[in-house]
Image (spheres, grey):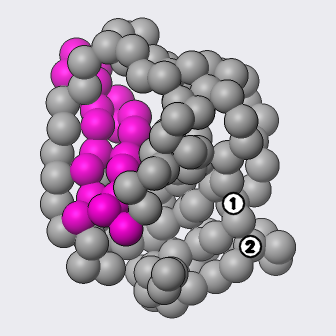
């Protein structure tokens, strides 16, 4: 499977299965310009990144350090890593080739969710970040 930014300067070759997480925190809303962010998380060894990303590190609402990688040319928010899960990497669901994705397994920071966003019934929901 492949993923890439808008201009193609940043890409990922992905092996293995991932799981989607939908985040409604204000930081993800600002990062994406959308009412929520959705990343598909993989084991880091299953993702080969190509191209140079600009990095931005911040403290998340959970208190953990989060680093975002985005394309310095087109600005696409592309990948995300967290201090809580150092062996994983999230790739933006919209950057994946194709237009089919599985529904998210988790929806976090629902206390910031826009009331008109519907979360699938099969998705675990958390008012704040997930513990553990």
Q: Is residue 55 left or right of residue 125?
A: left
Q: Is residue 34 left or right of residue 110?
A: left
Residue at point 32% right, 14% down?
A: 51
**Can you tell which quarter of the image residue 107 is in?**
bottom right
| Figure quadrant of the N terminus | top right
Residue at point 57% right, 20% down?
A: 13
Residue at point 64% right, 82% down?
A: 125
Counting every numbered tag in the picture gives 2
Q: Which residues are magenta?
A: 65-84
Q: According to the image, label 2 marks what residue?
A: 123
Q: Which mark is residue 17?
A: none
Q: Is residue 124 left or right of residue 42?
A: right
Q: According to the image, label 1 marks what residue?
A: 104
Q: Are marks 2 and 1 in contact (CB under 8 Å)?
A: yes
**Can you tell which quarter of the image residue 85 is in?**
bottom left
Q: Where is residue 83 shown, x and y percent of the image?
A: 31, 62
Q: Residues within 10 Å of mark 1 (few under 14, many from 20)?
A: some
Question: Would residue 79 be counted in the magenta stretch?
Answer: yes
In this view of the protein, can residue 32 be seen by the observer? no
Residue at point 48% right, 66% down?
A: 23
Element type at mark 1: loop
Relative to 14, say whether 92 is above or below: below
Mark 2 and mark 1: Cα distance apart in space: 6 Å
- In-front residue for pair 95/15: 15
In this view of the protein, can residue 74 be seen by the observer? yes
Q: Where is residue 2 shown, x and y percent of the image?
A: 61, 20
Q: Where is residue 24 shown, x and y percent of the image?
A: 45, 70
The answer to which of marks 2 and 1 sits earlier in the sequence is: 1
Relative to 64, say whether 103 is above or below: above
């Amino acid at each position: 499977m492949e993923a890439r930014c808008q201009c193609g300067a940043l890409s990922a070759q992905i092996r293995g299965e991932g799981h989607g997480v939908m985040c409604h925190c204000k930081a993800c809303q600002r990062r994406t310009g959308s009412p929520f962010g959705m990343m598909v998380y993989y084991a880091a060894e299953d993702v080969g990144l190509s191209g140079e990303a600009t990095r931005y590190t911040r403290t998340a609402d959970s208190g953990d350090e989060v680093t975002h990688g985005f394309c310095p040319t087109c600005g696409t928010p592309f990948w995300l890593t967290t201090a809580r899960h150092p062996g994983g990497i999230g790739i933006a669901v919209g950057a994946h080739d194709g237009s089919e994705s599985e529904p998210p397994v988790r929806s976090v920071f629902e206390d910031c969710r826009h009331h008109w966003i519907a979360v699938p019934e099969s998705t675990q929901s958390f008012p704040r970040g997930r513990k553990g």
